[in-house]
Amino acid sequence: MVKNSVFSVISPKQEKKEEIKGSVEFQVVNFTNQIRRLTSHLEFHRKDFLSQRGLKKILGKRQRLLVYLSKKNGIRYKELIDRLDIREPKIR
């Protein structure tokens, strides 16, 4: 159920789901779902230090993927950030 919504968020133009699973966008969406789930878990269980460690590791992995995507293709990076709403827009 969740994976079907992930596929629709990434790109509706691709037809094969097997091709999508290895993409950077799919991995970022998957990490974002895990981060949101762990964050809600940690709001209730504040002293769960192993989950905090896991959350930090996932945050680092997602950050590295986003840096890679921003260097490789800035347009896809901006579209993904807008869809997932994970960065705040810069106000100048």
Image (cartoon, rainbow, N blue to C red):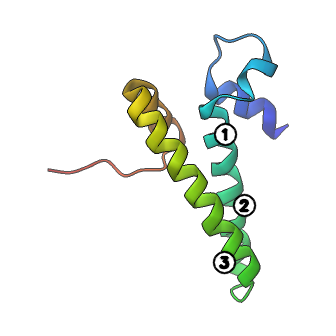
Compared across the picture, whether 91 is left or right of 69 comes to left
Quadrant of the image occupied by residue 34 = bottom right
Residue closer to the observer: 24 or 9: 24
Q: Residue at x 63, y 10 (%)?
A: 13
Q: Earlier in the sequence, mark 2 or mark 3?
A: 2
Compared across the picture, whether 60 is left or right of 41 comes to left
- Alpha carbon distance from label 1 to label 3: 24 Å
**Local SS, label 2:** helix
**Local SS, label 3:** helix
* Residue marked by disc 3: 43
Q: Residue at x 79, y 20 (%)?
A: 17
Task: Residue 78: tell me if it is visible.
Answer: no
Query: What amino acid is found at the position of numbered circle 2 in the picture?
Result: Arg
- Alpha carbon distance from label 2 to label 3: 10 Å
Quadrant of the image occupied by residue 9 = top right
Near mark 2 (Cα within 10 A), the count class, few <14, some 14-19 or many ≥20, is few
The residue lying furthest to the bottom in this view is: 47
Q: Earlier in the sequence, mark 1 or mark 3?
A: 1
The residue lying furthest to the left in this view is: 92
Near mark 3 (Cα within 10 A), the count class, few <14, some 14-19 or many ≥20, is few
**Circle nearer the viewer, 1 or 2:** 1
* Residue marked by disc 2: 37
- Alpha carbon distance from label 1 to label 2: 15 Å
Q: Earlier in the sequence, mark 1 or mark 2?
A: 1
Quadrant of the image occupied by residue 65 = top right
Is 75 drawn above or below residue 15 in the view shown?
below
**Local SS, label 1:** helix
Tags 2 and 3 touching, CB below 8 Å: no
